Amino acid sequence: MKNYFLPLTILLFVVSCENTYAEFRNLKSAPVLELALDDTSETNGVDYEFEGMYKVGNTSCIVKPIKMAFQVKWLKGRGVMNFFFDQITPDGKTIFVSEASGKSRDKFVFDNNHYNSGVFIREDGKVFTVKKLMLR
């Protein structure tokens, strides 16, 4: 029995890794739903973050916090962009701006600090609606 223990353990580990990889690979095509949180509801101790998957106009992006910035990877595009917290406006809108790359910057302007909806203002001035998405 001792002779079979190590090979059996390795086999179970490999099968487990294959299942995890298959789930990860299918995550890209998983259906998404618009986040059903009410922006006016109490937070109930939940810390909201600028993180996750967002629908921006007719494309989408994935946002991950990194050190003192937020890394944005666009579905249609190459590479990543870094955004930084800029300000909270007097009417409660939260703004994140991209690194300076030309005369202007890209901006995410969220309706409030729940980061569920807002607009994306491209550096050329074009405005897109933003909605947070959630994987099912």
Image (cartoon, grey):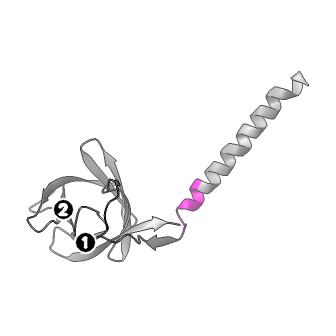
Residue 132 location in percent, x, y?
Answer: 36, 68
Q: Is residue 28 magenta?
A: yes
In-image side of 6 versus 119 (left or right): right
Which numbered disc covers residue 94? 2
Q: Is residue 122 magenta?
A: no
The stretch in magenta equals: 24-30
Marks 1 & 2, CB-CB < 8 Å contact = yes
Helix, strand or loop under label 1:
strand
**Residue 99 in view (yes/no):** no
**Residue 14 in view (yes/no):** yes
Residue drawn 47% across and 72% down?
Answer: 33
Which quadrant of the view contains residue 124?
Answer: bottom left
Q: Is residue 10 above or below residue 62?
A: above
Count the labels in the image: 2
Residue placed under numbered mark 1 in the picture: 118
Which class describes the residues within 10 Å of circle 2: few (<14), some (14-19), or many (20+)? many
Viewer-nearest residue: 120 or 47:
47
Residue drawn 41% across and 72% down?
Answer: 36
Which numbered disc covers residue 32? none
Residue 118 location in percent, x, y?
Answer: 25, 71
User: Label 2 is placed on what type of residue?
Assistant: Thr
Which class describes the residues within 10 Å of circle 1: few (<14), some (14-19), or many (20+)? many
In-image side of 94 versus 46 (left or right): left
Residue 40 location in percent, x, y?
Answer: 28, 71
Helix, strand or loop under label 2:
strand
Residue drawn 11% across and 69% down?
Answer: 91
**Which residue appears farthest toward the top when viewing the image?**
2
- Residues at marks 1 and 2, CA–CA distance in whole angstroms: 9 Å
